[in-house]
Image: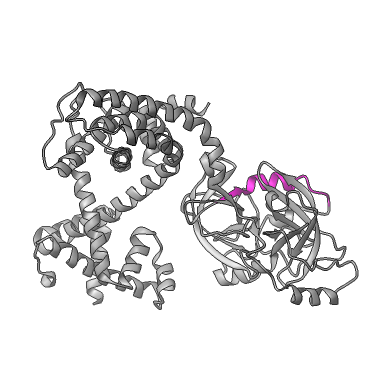
Amino acid sequence: MRDNSAQLLSDEQLIRSLALGESSTISHIYKSCYPTIEKMVFKMNGSLDDAYDTFQDAVTILYEKAKADELNLTCKFSTYITAVAKHIWLKKLTKKKNQSFSILHENMEDLIGVDQDVDLFFEFENNVSKLTSCFQQIGEPCKGVLTAFYITNKSMQDIAEEFGYTNAENAKTQKYKCLNRLRKLFFNENGVTQNERAY
Amino acid sequence: MNEHTNKYETVEKYCLGLMDDKEKMFFEIDMENNPALSNLVHEHKTLLKAFDHHNNKEFISYSLDAIHKHSHSHTAVVLKHLKLNVNKYWRTASVAATVAFMASTFTFLIARSVYKKDTHAQYQLLKGEINTIKKDQKAIKTEVDKVKKDVVPLPDYPSKFSGTGFAISKNGYLVTNFHVIDGYTKIFTVTYDGVGHQSEVVATDEINDIAILKIKEAEFAFDGKLPYSISIRKSNLNLANRVYSLGYPKSEIVYNEGYVSSTTGFEGDTNRFQLELPSGPGVSGAPIIDETGNILGVISGKQSQTEGVTYAIKSKALISLLKTLPKDFTLNALQDNIIKGQSRSNQINQIQRFVCMVKVYN
């Protein structure tokens, strides 16, 4: 019953509800697209875990694009997500084996933009792992304050209460101090030098 | 330092697209003339995007895991044995791939039928096993002994389960979960003062997991006016609505807060909604209250693998059941509340006197 109604969803509707993060849509994407992708990754020398990771990455890319209203499909949703997953997996394989794999074989349409999407995704992934390692270095209370604000989405008022600042304004000052520390760590690691006191 | 903070705040405001056109224009001119500022903006955007990407990925991975766990394990063993090096043995590999394809098709067939069964394991009812919760029975007993004749003291043996209930009328009607009292007739409501009152079930809605109890004592009355309201009109169930709850996961009342994370419940159940709110055994039946003091729903369960995800029954279902109650109950008292606009701690102070522990005995 549910499967039937899910199939009636047009790709346009699918993208719109994916942007909202609706669990029924994510479940529908899993049911309709994962089997193909699992099979594909497995065929291309990947394990089941590889297949699932790759699929998660592909859904994340599409979710982020849908949220930013940048997902304009020129083909079927399922074709697109499969192409994205394929690119991701080939990139991962390339990294792993230190050799390149051709993407252009088989009858997979060469979808414009997929390559850039995947590159951007790996750049974000890279930044997140850098962020994580910087977080290890900034220490408390910065770690807690930044997590509460940027990850758990707490209000400044709640953060002030939780971390014992007298008011939201003080908590905000602390938040920016922490952010500044994080920024320095993050970008100095990257080799970019700048003068923070320039303004 | 303050100037520094202001600068950062402006940058963040710009990065998040919260400036109006004029402010944005001036800021962009500033940026053009000040490379350091423009660099800061660039870096800030990168950081914000990293946080955002982290959150997005967590969200997708969390959503998919819930589905994937139940479809995955069947083929894992089969496929591990079949795993071959595709490059060297393409012939065998293609056979393996075909088998893998068959196996994975098979998984999805199995998965579909198993899925429904498995989900029950994921959904944990929050009825507290009494082994973990032991109230100081003696203190209650002495209290009870002092009180009037139609007062039945709490049994002196441990209760089977406990949950939370909240008053919906001054004269002793309460709401709890059906699963808390399901199959039991010896039910006691322990009010805020620690006194146990024998109670009976007067109405149930098994599908929506709601039960209405009535304290049996003829002269029983809650102290004071009901502080909260239960009004559908006022219950705009919106994502990110800040909510809080009071319940009895232990012998003392516990306060928790969180937000509405989905307007549907487990697997898209439209009679329920999803909360990001800590919960534990014993808070079944606890009210979910919004910032204006209106009850949005009743806690009924949580997702077992994920900490913090709690499900609640929408108050719509509750109100339908309330309409079937006898004439000594009236919905009017629940139309409006007296705590709207008060500070949170003031609200809690009043509400906690109307939230009780519900205990059932063999």
- The answer to whether residue B23 of the structure is visible from this angle is no
Say if residue A76 shows up in the picture. Answer: yes
Residue furthest top as drawn: A107
Residue interval drawn in magenta: B311-327
Is residue B326 shown in magenta?
yes
B318 and B101: which is toward the camera: B101
Q: Residue furthest right?
A: B149
Q: How is the image coloured?
A: one colour
Identify the residue at horizontal 55%, vertical 69% (top origin): B344
Q: Residue B64 at x, y = what percent?
A: 40, 42
Residue placed most toward the observer, B95 or A89: B95
- Magenta region includes residue B148: no
Q: How many marks?
A: 0
**Split into 4 quadrants, where in the image is the C terminus of chain A?**
bottom left
Q: Is residue B176 above or below residue B145?
A: above
State whether residue A63 is above or below residue B32. above
Q: Quadrant of residue B71?
A: top left
Q: Position of residue A157 (x, y in %)?
A: 42, 69
Q: Residue at x 65, y 44 (%)?
A: B208
In this orientation, which residue lies closer to the viewer: B115 or A168? B115
Residue A63: image x %, image y %? 33, 41
| Image location of residue A129, percent across then percent down | 24, 56
